[in-house]
């Protein structure tokens, strides 16, 4: 939750910062932003790896009527692993933003 809060706080600062500035000088805000994004993507990849283990063992919920969203995304043939990871991170951001007061 801390990572998402930091992402939200720093994201606005970076939104108003000119993009070319990062090419000249990497500010503290940019460094923190990348650290937070790396943490969130790492968390998303951990969730995905755990779900892939369940799928490979055959213990994941995977019937036609009742399937977990992550299992669905991983078994959907039109999405690659990079796209699934991005979706997991976005769902994480939305979930924390929904239940917390920034």
Image (cartoon, rainbow, N blue to C red):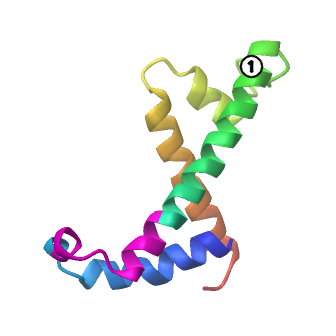
With respect to residue 96, does 57 lie above or below? above
Q: Which residues are magenta?
A: 21-34
In the rendered image, residue 40, in percent from the top left (x then y), is placed at 58, 57
Q: Answer whether residue 27 is visible to the viewer in this image.
A: yes
In the rendered image, residue 71, in percent from the top left (x then y), is placed at 67, 29
> Quick one: label 1, few (<14), some, or many (20+) residues within 10 Å?
some
Q: Main secondary structure of the magenta part?
A: helix
Residue 82 falls in which quadrant of the image? top left
Q: Is residue 26 magenta?
A: yes
Task: Locate the C terminus and report the quarter of the image it occupies.
Answer: bottom right
With respect to residue 83, does 53 lie above or below? above
In the rendered image, residue 15, in percent from the top left (x then y), is placed at 29, 78
Residue 56 falls in which quadrant of the image? top right
Q: Secondary structure at mark 1?
A: helix
Q: Residue furthest left?
A: 20
Task: Locate the N terminus and report the quarter of the image it occupies.
Answer: bottom right
């Amino acid at each position: 939750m801390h990572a998402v809060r930091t992402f939200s706080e720093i994201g606005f600062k970076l939104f108003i910062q000119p993009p070319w500035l990062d090419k000249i000088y990497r500010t503290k805000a940019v460094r923190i932003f990348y650290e937070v994004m790396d943490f969130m993507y790492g968390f998303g990849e951990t969730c995905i790896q755990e779900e892939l283990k369940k799928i490979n063992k055959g213990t994941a919920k995977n019937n036609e009527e009742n399937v977990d969203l992550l299992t669905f995304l991983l078994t959907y043939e039109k999405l690659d692993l990079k796209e699934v990871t991005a979706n997991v991170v976005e769902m994480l951001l939305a979930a924390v933003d929904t239940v917390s007061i920034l």
